[in-house]
Image: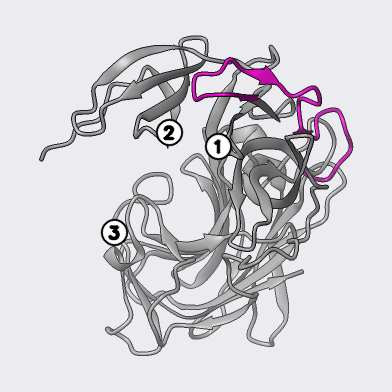
Amino acid sequence: MTYRNPVIPGIDPDLAWDCDGNCWVHFSGLGGIARSRVDIATGAFLDGPEITWSGTGLRYPESRHLYKRDGTWYLLIAEGGTHGGHCVSVARGPSPVGPWEGCPANPILTHRSTDAPIQNTGHADLVEFTDGSWWMVLLGVRPRGIGPGFHTLGRETFLVPVRWEEGWPVPGDLALEMPSAPAARASLPAPGRETFDAALGHHWVGVRRPPRDVSSLGARPGWLLLHGGEQTLDTSRVFVGRRQQHRHCRVTTRVDAMSATEAGLSVLLDSAAHYEVAVEGDRVVARGRVGGLAGVLGSAPGPHGPVVPTVGTEPDIHGPDAVSLGFIDDHGDAQTLARLDGRYLSSEVTGGFLGRLIGIYAVGGDAAFEWFDYEEA
């Protein structure tokens, strides 16, 4: 049978089934939270869509989820916008179509207008674990620096316990530490040195293509070989990296530039916002791109043989951090070529929601990397 999706006039669709086998889709659109009953075989709307509940009156009601618990239906939404006003609200009713009663404590979770280290909290979902406990998973960011605050790690996922009081979900306190949730696991590996003598872990990513399309582990055993083309970090990139996991970190690698005209480390937010330190011929060069401005920010003669470029993110009183670019010289001493404002690699400056990647890249030919060392500073 051929399935087709309904044309949903909105975003954030969510499916739920009632006891009669009806499939309900809720989404953000038509000026609020809308619903429709759909035929899952054909994708056709069986009724609606129509507005069902739009929260407490704050802007951008979205990210809706429908649940049934103890005979009562619950509609959980985000509202207030995905930035400083973000929050979580909930309503309940006797059926998937309501009528809906908003929780008297709405919004049931928000950090707006507070000095909490986690901000922009919202886009939540409720989960019942196999032991009967309830949890809320949600998004948030960790801004730093003077107003409006700047975040560089992107929207992160947080988990909080939930208790039920008088038929309403009550989230616990949101903290930086992972709570003792059953089966909770960190998604990124522990900091440390990674060698390239086995397949890359799932935390390694490429840009617009998987790492395997631009790299090889077998061509030079013990090294990761990147096949750089003519395009640079400003366009379609030969880049393989991992998420910046901590506000302050230090990253090093060992690179043999081989036939590449440029190869090294990059701190990358997008094609218009990135800093890098690279081997170019017999020199080590620090570069930066911020929007339409780009250029060499420092350079020095390179050491003999493979080079160890370095990237560090350090505390800064004005923004989220300062980013230092450098290398290790022939005497084993660290040399800094440039120290740059981290605000220009933040979501508040570039837009969007993604955090930084830190990784290796090559331009103009092949370059080999022996290891990659990521440490929390």
Residue 20 within the magenta-colored segment of the rendering: no
Q: Which residues are magenta?
A: 92-118
Mark identifier at residue 229:
3
Residue on which the image places disc 2: 18
Whether residues under marks 3 and 1 lie with C-beta atoms below 8 angstroms apart, the answer is no
Taking the spot 53% from the left edge, 33% from the top edge, the residue there is 65
Q: Mark 3, residues whose alpha carbon is within 10 Å: few (<14), some, or many (≥20)?
A: some
Q: Residue furthest left?
A: 1
Relative vertical location of residue 215 with respect to residue 86 in this rendering, above or below: below
- Marks 3/2: CA–CA distance: 54 Å
Residue 94 within the magenta-colored segment of the rendering: yes
Whether residues under marks 1 and 2 lie with C-beta atoms below 8 angstroms apart, the answer is yes
From the viewer's perspective, is 199 left or right of 149?
A: left
Q: Decide whether the magenta segment is chiefly helix, strand or loop.
A: loop
174 or 287: nearer the viewer: 174
Mark 3 is on which residue type? Gly
